[in-house]
DNA sequence: TTTGTTATATAACAAATGTTATCTATCACC
DNA sequence: GGTGATAGATAACATTTGTTATATAACAAA
């Protein structure tokens, strides 16, 4: 019988994820992962046929991490803005994972930013229709327009090129949000005066998602 | 005296640019460029101290190419939308150069997407204030909001993840544009009825920038 | 305790890359 | 024409990477 396994598959994937988080997916090489585990490259190729297989699992973990962020965004009082905030937060706190998930061709590593939009749209549709009193199609349109702004902010952050503070981004989001809402409000039955700009703004700037870590 | 130069510096940079256009900046290796010129790596290191120096010049050429696109966008009847259209067109036709210019940290290769916004903002401010009858600050704000959407579209295209057709993107841009405009129109003196949604939409979908090539 | 399976370490191989040393051939100037 | 400075070709070196062959050692079953 063989000796008991010393380094589980999961440990290897976790080490690879750490490398990806800190130095980007391109730094996930056999020797780099092995060094992080204080191990030779042997075990890696015992458990993974090729490095691509390992990277694929890193991708899966990255997506899980992303989803954990997004889910926390749904708990806030304004569903769309909570999601956007968490998406931007993910970009800031996990820039390398963000690049992996959203800034590479979807074929290469999976998902892609549009998939993220679709997913978030599904998650938020109920709340949006409820809070803003929109029908589903209009809610989707509204959400999509705002998501494009969120996606821009997140990508700017990741490319080290975002000159806006969190508060400024929230302000811009609020402005655009209100603007789009106004434009879309020829929807029958939308109550007037629901959008108190100052109140929404205050909400945005002050609301911090539960940092339940 | 030495023999006359057979391969000018410019030819090498041009070959390197072609490689970057087709296979991305990472494919710009000494041997790849040499192969494209049917030449050994010798000349490259005669004219460039390191590959980084060569890549820096590739970056400069890429930026010039980008500017050529942008300038043509100013000639259309709607300055902001012309710019946005050309920015998106650049992303579609030169995705690898787009990645180089706008999807890498600005320190690494220069400019960055925010610099592009600032530049475009400067180029368009006059027309925007004139056509939409806004003051400069409001025009900048208006432009910035829309640029965020344009940046998203362009980036989605480059990551092979954009499900929208040109017409759809134009429609979204028009919607958001009108929405933001409405929201910003508490500006004194803005004439009512200036924004004929159908007219603008027709303009957008039909307007093709002069393909003066 | 012996033994057979196999996880791990080590080292090697092959390919790709930047860079450099060396040689050859050119051609402007005398 | 002769010649010397040097552009270009060639090949080598060093490094990094994925991958694999080989050896070692651990450990469960006998």
Image (spheres, coloured by chain):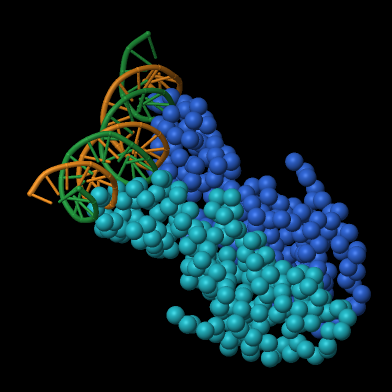
Chain colours: A cyan, B blue, C orange, D green
Q: Residue at x 84, y 56 (%)?
A: B205
Based on the displayed image, in which of its 4 quarters is residue A129 positioned?
bottom right
Q: Nearer the viewer, residue B191 or D16?
A: D16
Vertical placement of A167 versus B48: above or below?
A: below
Q: Nearer the viewer, residue A2 or A10?
A: A2
Labels in figure, total: 0
Q: Nearer the viewer, residue A198 or B28?
A: A198
Residue A134 percent across, percent down from the top left: 80, 78
Q: Residue at x 64, y 61 (%)?
A: A115
Q: Specify the quadrant that holds the N terminus of chain B.
A: top left
Vertical placement of A199 versus B50: above or below?
A: below
Residue C29 percent across, percent down from the top left: 40, 24
Q: Residue at x 83, y 89 (%)?
A: A192
Based on the displayed image, in which of its 4 quarters is residue A181 positioned?
bottom right
Vertical placement of A202 versus B141: above or below?
A: below
| In this picture, residue A63 sits left or right of residue C20 | right
Based on the displayed image, in which of its 4 quarters is residue A185 positioned?
bottom right
Vertical placement of B134 versus A118: above or below?
A: below
Q: Specify the quadrant that holds the C terminus of chain B.
A: top right
Residue B118 percent across, percent down from the top left: 63, 66
Residue B183 in sight from this viewpoint = no
Q: Residue at x 45, y 40 (%)?
A: B29
Residue B178 in sight from this viewpoint = yes
Residue B92 percent across, percent down from the top left: 68, 50
Q: Nearer the viewer, residue A124 or B147?
A: A124
């Amino acid at each position: 019988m063989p000796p008991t396994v010393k380094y589980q598959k999961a440990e290897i994937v976790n080490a690879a994820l750490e490398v990806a988080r800190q130095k980007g997916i391109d730094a996930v090489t056999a020797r780099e992962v092995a060094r992080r585990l204080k191990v030779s490259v042997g075990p890696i190729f015992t458990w993974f046929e090729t490095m691509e297989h390992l990277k694929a699992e890193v991708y899966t973990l990255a997506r899980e991490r992303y989803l954990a962020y997004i889910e926390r965004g749904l708990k806030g009082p304004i569903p769309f803005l909570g999601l956007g905030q968490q998406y931007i937060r993910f970009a800031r706190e996990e820039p390398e994972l963000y690049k992996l998930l959203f800034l590479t061709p979807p074929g290469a590593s999976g998902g892609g930013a549009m998939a993220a939009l679709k997913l978030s749209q599904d998650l938020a549709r109920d709340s949006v229709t409820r809070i803003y009193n929109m029908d589903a199609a209009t809610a989707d349109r509204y959400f999509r327009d705002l998501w494009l702004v969120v996606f821009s902010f997140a990508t700017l952050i990741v490319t080290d090129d975002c000159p806006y503070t969190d508060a400024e981004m929230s302000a811009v989001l609020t402005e655009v949000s209100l603007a789009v809402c106004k434009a879309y409000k020829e929807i029958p039955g939308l109550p007037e005066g629901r959008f108190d700009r100052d109140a929404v703004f205050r909400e945005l700037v002050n609301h911090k998602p539960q940092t339940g870590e």
